[in-house]
Amino acid sequence: MKLTDVYKDAIKRKYALGAFNFYNLESMKAILNAAEELKTPVILAVSESALKYFGFEFLKNAIKSARKTYTVPFFVHLDHGKDLDICKTAIKCGFDSVMIDASSLPFDENIKLTKSVVDFAHKKGIPVEAELGKLKGVEDDVNSTEALFTDPDEAVDFVKKTGIDSLAIAIGTSHGVNKFLGEAKIRIDILSKIEKKLKDFPLVLHGASSIPFEHIKKINSLGGNIKNAKGVPEDVLLEVSTKHNICKINVDSDLRIATTMAVREYLNNNTSEVDPRKYLKEAIKEMQNLVEHKIKDVFKTKNIKFLNY
Ligand code: G3H
Ligand code: 13P
Ligand code: ZN
């Protein structure tokens, strides 16, 4: 099964594939357990810093081993690669797809760098995602305080000149737990303009965690101090998955929050416990619940009869 075929199918039948970030065996297993349980293909995203945290050889073997262990199709994807070298490293590591994020560069330089990754990756049969516009907040090691929405005309030019397979757009979401100070504002109008101009082209939504209020409340009640937490409302995610050409939705913070909540809760209730397997098991369970909920109730990927799966 090729990711580009799944994207085509997602546009036709209106669903989005969840792209969940992982960085260790616990998060990797939680995402794959959820996908296997629901018989639903999933994207496992690895940031540059997560790749370093995992370690190249260890990750390469973990991916190989997961392909033997799980029957559900899954795609390992490089999230926010900053240059050609990291994309090459990811491909060597056994990734199925890469993102080159040159969105902090001027338009022409973004095109140039993105095109160089496309030229390399396509020769190896690997699809490429790129980004146009800027998300507010922290994008891996890049900080941007100003959101810059994607310009629909530039998007057409960018796709034509780079030959990318999918485009990450900026329509008001951002990374991390503090996405909005007041009401959540997502520019569906800009999304609609982009899809009108880029007919049937796979679009990607980053910064799409919902930052569940109940999870934050529990963390704070157990000694945490997370302020002004606000995420993307799930009805908006449901709308972009089922009525628009968003084919991939990125979730990282929600998994981090689920882990933090589970560990705090377990240790709070079991103050003499020192065995990490006990609390990490709870973390896996909470992450798996979250992934299953997103797939079933929000992205609507479950029950889609996948190509040959
Ligand atoms: O988009 C950014 C991701 O949430 C990755 O963050 O570099 O801390 O793993 P990270
Ligand atoms: P969140 O911080 O909203 O989970 O965003 C994740 C993301 O976009 C990863 O690329
Ligand atoms: Zn992102």
Image: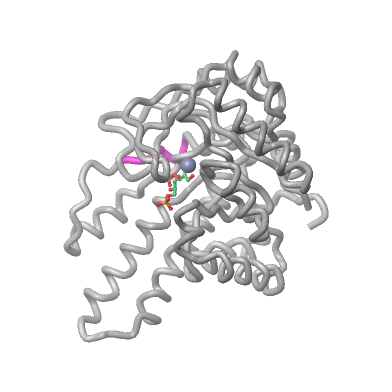
Would you place residue 181 above or below residue 253 in this image?
Answer: above
From the viewer's perspective, tell me whether residue 49 is left or right of residue 37.
left
Whether residue 40 is visible: no
Q: Position of residue 56 (x, y in %)?
A: 56, 64
Q: Position of residue 2 (x, y in %)?
A: 77, 49
Q: Residue at x 66, y 16 (%)?
A: 197
Q: Position of residue 283 (x, y in %)?
A: 40, 69
- Using the rendered view, name the quadrant where residue 210 is placed: top left
Q: Position of residue 20 (x, y in %)?
A: 52, 53
Q: Residue at x 49, y 39 (%)?
A: 206
- Looking at the magenta stretch, what is its main secondary structure? loop
- Can you name the residue that lies furthest to the front here? 85
Would you place residue 279 above or below residue 120 in this image?
Answer: below
Coloured how? one colour
Which quarter of the image is occupied by the C terminus?
A: bottom right
- Using the rendered view, name the quadrant where residue 255 is placed: bottom left
Q: Residue at x 64, y 52 (%)?
A: 302
The span picked out in magenta is 230-235
From the viewer's perspective, tell me whether residue 12 is left or right of residue 290.
right
Question: In front: 61, or 123?
Answer: 123
What is the total number of numbered labels drawn onto the structure image?
A: 0
Q: Is residue 303 magenta?
A: no
